[in-house]
Image (tube, grey):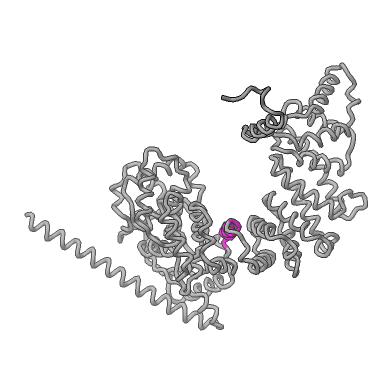
Amino acid sequence: MNPAPSQVPRMARRRLAAAAGRSAAVHPITLEADTPAVRELAGEIRSATAGQGEQHRVPLLRIHKVLEDALPKMRGPPSADMQLVLKHYHHKLYLSTDSSSDYLAALALLASSGDRLDASVEDMVKQSSQVLMDNLHNASLKKSTAELASLDVLLNALSICARLHLRGCPPPDALPRRIANVICKEQFADKFVSEVSPQDAWTMLRSLAAIGSAPPAALFLLDRYFDREGRIAQLPRVKVVQMVEALCMLRSRGPALQAVCDQLATQVVKITPQQRLALLRSFAAINVAPNLLYLFLGSGRRWRLKLSASNQAEMLSAFAELRFRPRGSAFFKDLILTVLRGRPGADPLRLCYDLFLLDMFDEPSFKRLETTINSPQRDKIPLEEACRVLASLGYFCYGQPSTYDTLLAEVARFEASLYQNRQCLVQLKSLEIGFRIGHSAFPISNLSPSAQQTLLRVRHAEVADLSRDAAPTGWTQDIRRIAGQVCNRTYFNITVGPFLVDFVRTSDGTPQTKLDQGGDERLQAVRQCVALEPLKGQCFYRGSDDSELTSSSKYRHLLLRGLGIEVCPVSRQQWVGMTSDAEKVHYLREVVTEGMARLKDRRKEHARKISQMKWQKRVHARSVS
């Protein structure tokens, strides 16, 4: 029985109260949507608007101070009072000044908001940006009237633009681009390289990454700055890792990225597992594999175990996107086994596509994939994921017709946007050609009628030849030039890759229908041809001692050969070692001759099989009669 409160000593009551306070639930501190000053100011503005007061008595400086105090505390969307104060602030700003410094201060005020802003400030952002761009034009012309003709002011303006992007009210794209271009001008660029601190340069890089774009001149200037010895070493490791993320986000592969990776290589042991995962994700985004990646593999396996199953599956996806498959690496083998055994922590759709990219088949993973797809509780599958899964199933010749029917039904939902998605269309065409040439788990007749119609429409869809718009290099152009000479002198049906699976088409665009002996002569000439494909770096896996073709390259070659196109790879190492055109012509003639011989043998084998099938049908017919 508890004693009465009057019988409990005073000190004991204090201890009990303190214990009760510690055990009580802790409620989060909630900030008001508006401060009292905002509500008071909004009331004055309404009174002045209604004619009950004088509107000019609300000075601009007072509104600025109230917003300066209230915006950082704002949580949630702007209230009606806040919107009214912001609108009045914009009106007073427009009437009272045309100074770019005042408009820059207004943008800085909006950028200090504690939460995202809405469309109510869009007009103020646009007008302020236009005033700044006019002044930046004067600064680029070295006019003495320019208020922004200072490197510190320009860097601050770029940082404000980045914060506005994060607050949901981005300025026009022309403003940050104009600021970056002015910084790269002669009167500022040398000062930036020699006087700006690494912290300010890092802030500029992060601002450009937050904006999402950067002019080439700005990336070149940052390469110049960070390529100097000792600059990156002055930054903490966390910011160096963030530099890699920012550079990869801007798709920069210049000296700055190499310098950052070299700096991280000196302290690879101190990089945390989460930071390593972030670095891998960034490298995969731009498809680069610096030496730092190999140091991660050689620094032991314990750090990988500190990551969750989903994070390790994400790491495997990064390796797959990088085409990174090191032979004999215990780290890589353990990673694959961990991801495959910890299946509940990995997305089956993504995991099977990663296995396709790495050319590794795991039947339990594909069985789990089919169970997930055919489950009535499954979510809607996006177009890209459905096409990736179909490409994986088609490559490994695996799956039940019901799985293909479900995935093709998901594809049919996005058919309006399918033909604008080149990668998805190529993956579906690969599947259709696989059914056509017999590289499939079952005949196409086992599919549902709607799935067959979807594949038929995909078959007749147009995809431009990749060899027409692929980025040419010096040695691929040289191969094309020499191949033209060989073609004119010896063979009439030579072409140069790389190729898409939709490569086989007549000149008038009529799609190929069947591989028989009749039909258009031009189509027959294209079918029975030798294709020279320059083997670039993206055709091989990284981290392997031998040159191993990726699964995508193998799949493409298999489909082209099934269509009657003999692919003859041309090695860059051999090609670069040749000095004269005569050597190159002789080399290509040998390659084409061997390809023609293989094509002829394949046609003979195909004819022999057809003849054998016809003979078996005749024997069966005689036995029945």
Q: Main secondary structure of the magenta part?
A: helix
Residue at 74% from the left image edge and 60% from the top image edge: 217
**Residue 274: x, y in percent?**
58, 56
The magenta-colored residue range is 274-287
Viewer can see residue 117: yes
Residue at 43% from the left image edge and 58% from the top image edge: 355
In the displayed structure image, the side of residue 477 where residue 533 appears, left or right: left
Viewer can see residue 509: no
**Residue 480: x, y in percent?**
52, 71
Query: Which quarter of the picture shows residue 60?
Result: top right
User: Is 276 a magenta residue?
Assistant: yes
Query: Which quarter of the picture shows residue 95?
Result: top right
| Of residues 151 and 500, the one drawn nearer to the viewer in this rendering | 151
| Of residues 110 and 504, the one drawn nearer to the viewer in this rendering | 110
| Of residues 599 and 409, the one drawn nearer to the viewer in this rendering | 409
Extreme residue toward the right, this view = 144
Position of 128 relative to 557 (above/below) = above
**Residue 485: x, y in percent?**
50, 75
Position of 84 relative to 453 (above/below) = above
**Considering the image in quadrants, where does the C terminus appear?**
bottom left
Query: Which quarter of the picture shows residue 53?
Result: top right
Residue at 88% from the left image edge and 23% from the top image edge: 55
Position of 551 relative to 474 (above/below) = above
**Considering the image in quadrants, where does the N terminus appear?**
top right
**Residue 526: x, y in percent?**
40, 63
Position of 620 relative to 73 (above/below) = below
User: Is 161 a magenta residue?
Assistant: no
